[in-house]
């Protein structure tokens, strides 16, 4: 059982918290045999109703020596 599950059982916080949900999509692009580029997108729906959802865009460039 995870810690957030323990918090949901609390009498005060349990009624406020909901399940958090998230998704990530990414794609590895091989530019050369030693260089890879990876764009990604994450979507997070938080467990609190008072917090808006988040969309995060990121990129990574990996170089192998």
Image (cartoon, rainbow, N blue to C red):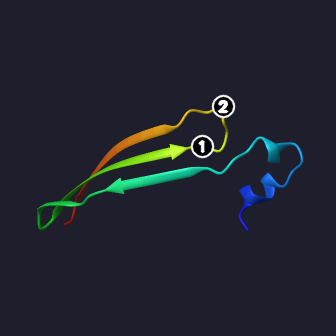
Crowdedness near tag 1: few (<14), some (14–19) or many (≥20) residues, C-alpha within 10 Å: some
Q: At 24% from the left edge and 60% from the top edge, which residue is drawn?
A: 28
What number is the disc on residue 50? 2
Looking at the picture, does residue 10 appear above or below residue 32? above
In the rendered image, the quadrant that contains the N terminus is: bottom right
Element type at mark 1: loop
Coordinates of residue 38 in the picture (x, y in percent): 26, 55
Residue 50 is situated, as x and y percent measured from the top left of the image, at 66, 31
Residue underneath mark 1: 46
In the image, residue 61 above or below residue 51 = below
Left or right: where 33 falls relative to 23? left
Mark 2 Cα shell of 10 Å, populated few (<14), some (14-19), many (≥20): few
| CA–CA distance in space, label 2 to label 1 | 9 Å
Q: Which residue is rendered at x = 71% and y = 64% of the image?
A: 2
**Is 3 placed left or right of 19 in the picture?**
right
Place of residue 5 in the rendered image (x, y in percent of width and height, measured from the top left): 75, 59
- Give left or right: position of 28 versus 44: left
Q: Which mark is residue 9?
A: none
Q: How many marks?
A: 2
The answer to the question of whether label 2 and label 1 lie on touching residues, with beta carbons closer than 8 A, is no
- Residue occupying the point 49% across, 38% down: 54
Say which residue appears at 51% left-offset and 45% top-offset: 44
Q: Quadrant of residue 25?
A: bottom left
Q: Quadrant of residue 15?
A: top right
Along the line of sight, which residue is nearer the eye, 57 or 20? Answer: 20
Q: Position of residue 8 (x, y in %)?
A: 79, 53
Residue at the outermost right position: 11
Q: Secondary structure at mark 2?
A: loop
Placement of the C terminus among the 4 image quadrants:
bottom left
Above or below residue 13? Residue 1 is below
Q: Is residue 63 left or right of residue 56?
A: left
């Amino acid at each position: 059982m995870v810690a957030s599950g323990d918090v949901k059982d609390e009498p005060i916080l349990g009624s406020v918290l909901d399940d958090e949900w998230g998704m990530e999509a990414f794609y590895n692009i091989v530019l050369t045999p030693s260089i890879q580029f990876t764009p990604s997108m994450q979507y997070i729906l938080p467990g609190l109703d008072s917090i808006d959802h988040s969309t995060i865009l990121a990129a990574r460039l990996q170089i192998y020596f």
